[in-house]
Image (cartoon, rainbow, N blue to C red):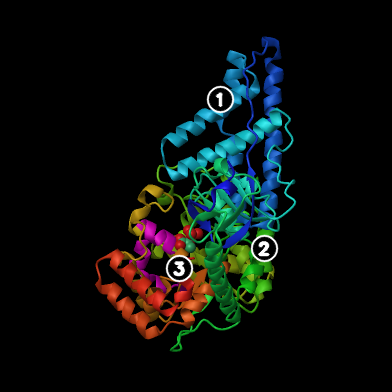
Amino acid sequence: MSAQAKGEKVFRGTAVSAGICRGKILVLHRARHVIVRREIPETDVPAEIDRFEKSLVQTRLQILEIQNKVAKNLGSKEADIFEAHLQMLDDPNLLNEVFQLIKEQHSNAEYAFHSTAERFAEALLAAEDEYLSQRASDIRDFTARVLDNLLEVKDAFDLRHISEPCILVSHDLSPSTTAQLDKKLVLGFATDIGGKTSHTAIMARSLGIPAVVGLESASLELDTGDYALLDGYNGLLVVNPTDQTLFQYGQLQQHKASLNEKLTEIQRQPAVTLDGKAIHLSANIEAPADTAAVIQHGADGVGLFRTEFLFINREKLPTEEEQYQAYRQVAQALKPQSVIIRTLDLGGDKFASHLHLAQEMNPFLGWRAIRLCLAQPELFRPQLRAILRASAEGNVKMMYPMISGLDELKQANALVDKYKAELRAEGLPFDENLEVGVMIEIPAAALVADDLARHAKFFSIGSNDLIQYTLAADRTNEKVSYLYEPTHPAIVRLIKLTVDAAHRHGIWVGVCGEIAGDPNLVPLLIGLGVDELSTAPTGVAQIKYMIRRLKLTEAQELAQFAMECGSPSEIYQRCQLLARADAPSLFENKA
Ligand code: PEP
Ligand code: MG
């Protein structure tokens, strides 16, 4: 029965992308493949294997095409997620089983592939872990694509027939489908399954459309044409909203619109507290394409330019020249504001397929970032030379990730001196006074910050890693996410140690991890003495708003409390109280 016959009905799920939209629902059901087992005559086995291999090649080309499109439209981070699909195309465990079924049991390729892939997906789902179930969705997404190719089905999940604006409702939306959504026609989307960390959710946030996942049975209960309101703040899909509901949401939308106006008004204003403390508020970027957003959102340049984008999703290492062009492009676009380029941070959860690094038991404690670079001059030299050459623009700074102590820092600095000498000899220009900083993201670095400060021009606290390493809680593992607490006293004290050491030596300290983009935590960071904050370009305006409504004195009182308190949750509550008292409109999400 249509929801229209039933009056208002509210489906509750998880909000993954903020915003509200209203409109007609379009229910999308992915066409299910009917896979039958056929017996292949012995003589046809080579042809069947050939057919299967061709479908894999075709799938690879399609994924690369989507990946390219996504990289252009949404950025490199979103494009990275197709790397998992490409890796599955080469997964020997999966493919060998399929080949075996075709060769030994004379199975048709569709059946051999579908049954094997489904078994892999089921095994991942059985673990009941959010990350692994996301990998299972990846397998199913990629399986459907291979099957489309084997069965010669033309785009079974065709979004081209959307002709008027709608809210998409579906059991699941794969990242590759989400990547093809047209923002003008898709007002928002809602799915039965999925979680906050799913790739689809990340894409929705980048697209800037409201999205709610985990609505369980919405796609079965609803019909195309039903009218609904999607609330991406509170995770609700309200079908057939009553006038009262529409009125309340109208008020929330008005509130958000007036907040946006206020945020736009201060876009060109400085990030300064009510009592005059100026904070350098910059943006994190991952690719040259992100510079437009840095300018649009009024950030003071770039506080973290992650350079891994140049190294993943490709067959060969980027040359010095290619890197130089990318770095120079960003520096030129943002002049005279500064651009802090972080040297390569591969390893951990970020791998480049062409480097063929051995698998490690503990990749986050392994051969990552500066460790890898110092050991591999063929990797580090072109990057350092490229950054040095780009520094000729005059507004470039550089920092090293994952420094654990003084020897590493000295080694890296010695290499910079060596490559400066090379460039001088070659007559290539660079900034002789290039400022080089250190990321503080290993607890040991915070503890020896005094020593490091003598050899660095600034510090940037990588809180994502600092929290993970201090609390021994893998930042990608949902099972230990409850331990991942930014207001743990150990984190507060390490930040304070870092700030005090830096200031004793006359250098500044920034924070470029995710906590710099959380308005609840910004007063604490400022109270602890942090001089710079760097966050996603889209988060800059609300952080500036928070800063402009804050007094340094009250932030310092909060920091004092946090330094003396032993409880992470009590510290967080005090942070929330202050943030909400000073900037209530940032936190009003209820309709
Ligand atoms: C961090 O660790 O906080 C950081 C900014 O670096 P990344 O997230 O790239 O490891
Ligand atoms: Mg880090």
Residue at point 57% right, 76% down?
258
Which residue range is magenta in the image? 442-469
Magenta stretch: helix, strand or loop mostly: helix
Observer-side mark, 1 or 2, equals 1
- Mark 3 — residue? 518
**Is 456 covered by the magenta stretch?**
yes
| Near-viewer residue (527 or 446) | 527
- 86 above or below 236? above
**Disc nearer the start of the sequence (3/1):** 1
Q: Are marks 3 and 1 in contact (CB under 8 Å)?
A: no
Say whether residue 386 is left or right of residue 439. right
Observer-side mark, 3 or 2, equals 3
**Is 343 covered by the magenta stretch?**
no
Look at the image and tell me whether residue 140 can be seen: yes
Residue 58 lies in quadrant: top right
**Disc nearer the start of the sequence (3/2):** 2
Residue kind at label 2, given as amino acid type: Ala
Provide residue 432's location: percent of width, then percent of height: 59, 76
Provide residue 591's location: percent of width, then percent of height: 49, 65
Q: Secondary structure at mark 1?
A: helix
Spatial distance from mark 1 to mark 2, Cα to Cα? Answer: 41 Å
Provide residue 573's location: percent of width, then percent of height: 33, 69
Quarter of the image for the N terminus: give it.
top right
- Mark 1 — residue? 115
Residue 205 lies in quadrant: bottom right
